[in-house]
Amino acid sequence: MPERTRIDIASLMGKKQRGEKISMLTAYDHPTARLLDEAGVDSILVGDSAGNVVLGYKDTLPVTMDEMVMLTRAVTRAVRHAFVIGDMPFMSFNVTPAKAIVNAGRFVKEGGAQAVKLEGGAAVVRTVKAIMGAGIPVCGHLGLTPQTANQLGGYRVQGKTAAAAKKIFDDAIRLEDAGVMMIVVECIPDRVAAAIAARVKVPLIGIGAGPHCDGQVLVINDLLGLSFGFSPKFVKRYADLGRAISRAAGSYCNDVARGKFPAKAHSFEMEDNEFARFERLVRSAPRSPLR
């Protein structure tokens, strides 16, 4: 089987132009990224959703640049095929364009990412242009933007009125004009997403945005059944690894408590003559003065 080539921006644009759907998943560690890459996913997003699903925060706001760079570096060490995007955390880009460039640069230089993602529409256009001007590709994020969910009235569907939908549509055009290579739209009506996908030339990736986007993204923990609490309507669970892990850990604890693990098959042997020598050496060894 010939080795797959590394996906780049041109590859993703080609998929949109040919009407081929783009697959994207989040990953936050080396083994998961390796498995997703081997499975053939087109793009991996090292999302700030790590705050909720990996780091134990109640939301994404506390996530730091250092944490995101560390997670991104773990992912990129594993990837040979997929296009890797680092997610810029809260207050890493919505400060000054100069600071945003420095932080975006860390994702590429230290983390090995091929692009960065940031949330927002018209308000971040200047920042997007600055980062792009520094030679770093940018992915936009519109609709439900978790970092500003408090301003949006919580985690709810966006663009449900004509005026709100038009704003998201206009913001998508502004981001494209600013030079983004891709746009993620989250929790918006499917027909609004379809209108945006038909209008912009860059790939539109949906999460809770219906089937008419150019691709889809899900949080890997949701897909695998490794998340806790509320599950959004748009999530499709493909496995229940949470229950499988719990059962496996329970079986292990039971085996240890009953002395069933480790068994002989899990232990290392020693030649009889060497063990006899060992016993003689132990017997002849001087006792510790503390004993």
Image: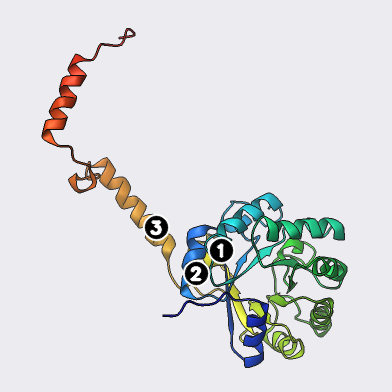
Query: Residue at position x 49%, y 62% from top?
Result: 32
Q: Is residue 90 visible?
A: no
Residue on which the image places disc 3:
245
Q: How far apart are marks 3 and 2 (CA)?
A: 19 Å
Q: Which residue bears the numbered disc 2?
A: 36
User: Which one is nearer the viewer's eye here, 210 or 74?
Assistant: 74
Q: What residue type is labelled 2?
A: Leu
Residue farthest front in this picture: 2
Seen in the image, is 239 located left or right of residue 23? left
Disc 3 vs disc 2: which is toward the camera?
Answer: 2
Rendering coords of residue 192 (x, y %): 73, 86
Quarter placement of the N terminus: bottom left
Residue at the image point whose x is 81% and y is 79% from the top:
164
Q: Are marks 1 and 2 in contact (CB under 8 Å)?
A: yes
- Where disc 1 sits, the SS reads loop
Instruction: Identify the image quadrant of the C terminus.
Output: top left
Numbered mark located on residue 27 in the image: 1
Between circles 3 and 1, the one closer to the viewer is 1
Counting from the top left corner in percent of width and height, residue 119 is at 76, 67
In the picture provided, is 181 more to the left or to the right than 237? right
Regarding mark 2 in the picture, which secondary structure is present there?
Answer: helix
Q: Residue at x 25, y 11 (%)?
A: 286
Rendered location of residue 65, percent (x, y): 70, 52
Q: In the rendered image, is residue 266 in sight?
A: yes
Determine which quarter of the picture holds residue 263. Answer: top left
